[in-house]
Image: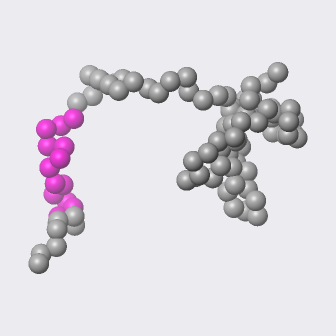
Amino acid sequence: MPNPIYVLPSPKVPSMLTIDAQEIAIPPRILSSIQAGEAIFIELEHQPLAILLPGGLPAAPRPAGLCKGEFTVPDDFNEPLEDWGDLFAPASP
């Protein structure tokens, strides 16, 4: 039996529906593409409707500090960029 396929609604819709692939009529070539690792974008009248993603959901969120020590943030990271000038400076009264 194949893994379940997760149907994600269009962005900004905070819900998820899990459907067994045998419950709906997914053409074999589409199912094969998903099993091969491809994402399938579904459109209705040329508008994004949903995304079919392969595999399952991540087992657990990635822990904080996963890349600790692999790079360093420069001391001047929060300093204004010279070539941006006053673009983001507050407006004068």
- Of the pair 44 and 61, the residue shown nearer to us: 61
Q: Eyeballing the image, is 58 above or below 84?
A: above
Q: Examine the image and state in which quarter residue 67 appears.
A: top left
Residue 9 x, y percent position in the rendering:
65, 49
For the point 18% across and 55% down, which residue is it? 81
For the point 36% across and 23% down, which residue is it? 66
Magenta-span inclusion, residue 32: no
Q: Quadrant of the C terminus?
A: bottom left
What range is drawn magenta here? 73-85
Q: Quadrant of the N terminus?
A: top right
Q: Is residue 26 left or right of residue 14?
A: right
For the point 63% across and 52% down, which residue is it? 10
Q: Eyeballing the image, is 11 above or below 85?
A: above
Q: Is residue 16 left or right of residue 93?
A: right
Q: Examine the image and state in which quarter residue 27 appears.
A: top right
Does any portion of residue 38 appear in the rendered image? Answer: no
Q: Is residue 38 left or right of residue 80?
A: right
Residue 24 x, y percent position in the rendering:
85, 40
Q: Eyeballing the image, is 1 above or below 91?
A: above
